[in-house]
Every structure is written in structure tokens, then in C-alpha cells.
Amino acid sequence: MQELFDECARDILDVIPRIMQFIRVEMRSKRTPDLTVPQFRTLAFINRRPGVSLSEVAEHIGITLPSASKLADGLVGRALITRQEAFIDRRKVTLEITPQGKALLNAALQGAHAGLAIGLQGLSQEDLAAIQRAMRVLRPIYSPETNPIATER
Amino acid sequence: MQELFDECARDILDVIPRIMQFIRVEMRSKRTPDLTVPQFRTLAFINRRPGVSLSEVAEHIGITLPSASKLADGLVGRALITRQEAFIDRRKVTLEITPQGKALLNAALQGAHAGLAIGLQGLSQEDLAAIQRAMRVLRPIYSPETNPIATER
DNA sequence: TATTGTTATACTCTATAACTATA
DNA sequence: TATAGTTATAGAGTATAACAATA
């Protein structure tokens, strides 16, 4: 049984970086608006949770606060998000997505979905179900929000 | 049915970056020898295929030749691989892993497996099977070797 | 001419350390 | 004193463009 865990871990370590590279290339290709993966993830997170603080972004993405600060710099510079001092606690910062940010995010989402979906066309319904199940169970395990060990350095 | 493809693509786009970030953090943590993910992948590839050329590495990792060249610089600098002019075609370069490289690779593999496997402990046998199936079917789809579209820029 | 690789240049991602401002 | 964020600094990943050497 321990065998199975190890096999799974090996498979994950082999395959996830390949898929990630695919996503990265798709995101930077001419087919899709130019966003890096961290920029895309940040934009999507702020879109889902308007008004989040920088710390929350850092935790969600799984990076340090200084890294998140720089990441936000870039998005603010491109006018995809806004950054304001928070009312209640002036140490904090409040992030919001701009209309341009929303538009770009949606275009990037569509491009990335399309790129990924093309590859899936040949798969059986069972294969697709396995993928969905795998993603569903893996998600909480390796997310910093639900598993703090996921960001222990 | 198109629905299913789209759902799958969405799930992949949401979950794969999380797992990747987990792997990245694990690889740079004190628990594991300090290797970046691309360095790790390159080392593993050269270990599996001694004597590969730089172009083959670039294709496998999914990066350009200049990027691969720089990546190799770092590994040569740390004496984890050697780089030699090829006999048959002197334009090419022949990459080999060193004993230190092998040792570090094995330690990194162990560390990363252990880190990943911990999270899997709570899963059922069916969940693990779904993960394995998902990884098996996704692998060729998003690998540059088997799907050249995976590196189209 | 085409292929293999390197060098130059430029950006982004990421970290740690040091700092400021607020609580 | 503790928390939220920024700035400074540094190294790695990545790309495109220009180049050299070999086939």
C-alpha cells in the first residue's frame, strides 16, 4: 500500500511540471493575452475576492510578501488592478481588479482553456472523469489555504 | 460533452499551478537538496539518457536553446553534469551526469517524493487510482516529445 | 544554407534582509 | 512588540536577437 503512495508521488513529480510548462507556454503565446502564470493566478484571485489584502494574495499564490508586492507592482503598472490603503487597518492594502483587468483575465482564461481542451479531445469519458476526480482530491492537499504545510519553507 | 472538456480544462488550470507551487517550495526547502524544478528535471533527464545533446534537453523541458544553455551553465558550474563536444558532430554537445549529480538527484527525488506522499496518506485506493490514471493520460498530451503543439510559441 | 550552440540583453519570479508605518 | 507592506539586493528562468562554428 505504501507502494501506491510512492508511485503516485512519482507520477505527480513527472507529469505536473510538463503540464505546467504547457500552460506557461500557452499563456505567453500569441494566441493568448500575455500574462505570466503568477500574474494570471493573482488576477483571478482578486477577481473572485475583490478587496483582498496583499498578504492574502501571497498566501494563496504560495509566495512571500515581498514577492507578492513586486507581483502587484507589475499588475498595477499595467493598470490591471488597483492598490489602495485599507480604511479599517491602514497597514493593509486593498486590491481590486479594473475593467481592463477583467477583460484581459477573461481573454486569458478563454485562451488557456482552449489550448488545454484541444489536447483532451481524444480522451474517453472515463479518462476525463479520472482527471476531474484527481484534480478535486489533489486541490485541497496542495493548497496553502487548506494545508499550511504546502508553504512551509 | 464539450462541457466535460471545458470543465476538465478549468480544473487543470486551477489545480496544476497549486501542485507545481507545492513542488517548487518543497524543492527549495531545507528538507530537500536545493534544486530548482528545471534543474531537477534536466538532471533527471540526463540521468535517464546519458550523452543527450542540449537541443534534446531544450525540447524535453520545453524551453528555448538559449535558456537550456544557461540552465546547463548552472549545472556544470555546480559540477552536477559535464558538457563535452560531441565526436560525430562537433556542433553538438554531449551531456553527462556526474557522481555528485547522481547523488544530489537521488536525494532530491527522495525529498520530493516524501513531501508529496505525505499529503496522499488520507486518500482512498480509488482516489489514488484516479490520480494515476489522470497522470498517465495527461502525460503524453502535454509533453513536447509526443505532442509538438506543447511547445508552439 | 541549415543546424547547434553561445552570448548579449531584458524581464519576470522568487527569496532574504532591512526598513517604515500602523496597531 | 507584532503585523502589513515596501525597498534593496541577488540569483534563477525565460525569451528574442545576433553571432560563431560546423555540417
Image (cartoon, coloured by chain):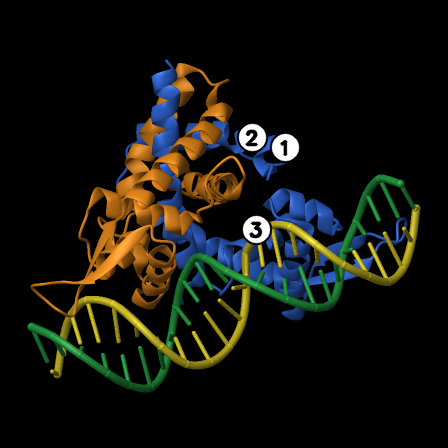
Chain colours: A orange, B blue, C green, D yellow
- Residue B126, image x and y in percent? 32, 27
Whether the residues at callouts 2 and 3 have beta carbons within 8 Å, the answer is: no
| Quadrant that contains the C terminus of chain B | top right
**Mark 1 and mark 3: span between their CA atoms?**
19 Å
Is residue B125 positioned above or below A34 on the image?
Answer: above
Q: In the visual, does A95 lie left or right of B119?
A: left
Seen at 47% across and 23% down, the residue is A120
**Which numbered disc, 1 or 3, marks the residue that appears first in the sequence?**
3
Which x, y percent locates residue D7?
36, 77
- Residue depth check, mark 2 versus mark 1: number of the one nearer the observer: 1
In the image, is residue B101 above or below residue A117? below
- Residue topped by disc 2: B140
| Number of numbered tags placed on the structure image | 3
Q: Which residue is mark 1?
A: B148
Regarding residue B127, the answer to whether it shows in the image is yes
Q: Quadrant of residue A130?
A: top left
What's the residue at 73%, 62% (across, down)?
B82
Q: Which sits in the foreground, B47 or B56?
A: B56
First in sequence: mark 2 vs mark 3: 3
Is residue A27 left or right of B6 when viewed as pictured? right
Q: Splitting the image into 4 quarters, where does residue B66 fall? A: bottom right
**Which amino acid lies under the numbered mark 1 shown in the image of this protein?**
Pro
Mark 3 burial class by Cα count in 10 Å: few <14, some 14-19, many 20+? many
* Secondary structure of the residue carrying numbered label 3: helix
Residue at image location 34% in from the left, 53% down from the top = A79
Q: Which residue is mark 3?
A: B41
Q: With A84 as the anchor, is A43 left or right in this view? A: right
Which chain is home to disc 1?
B
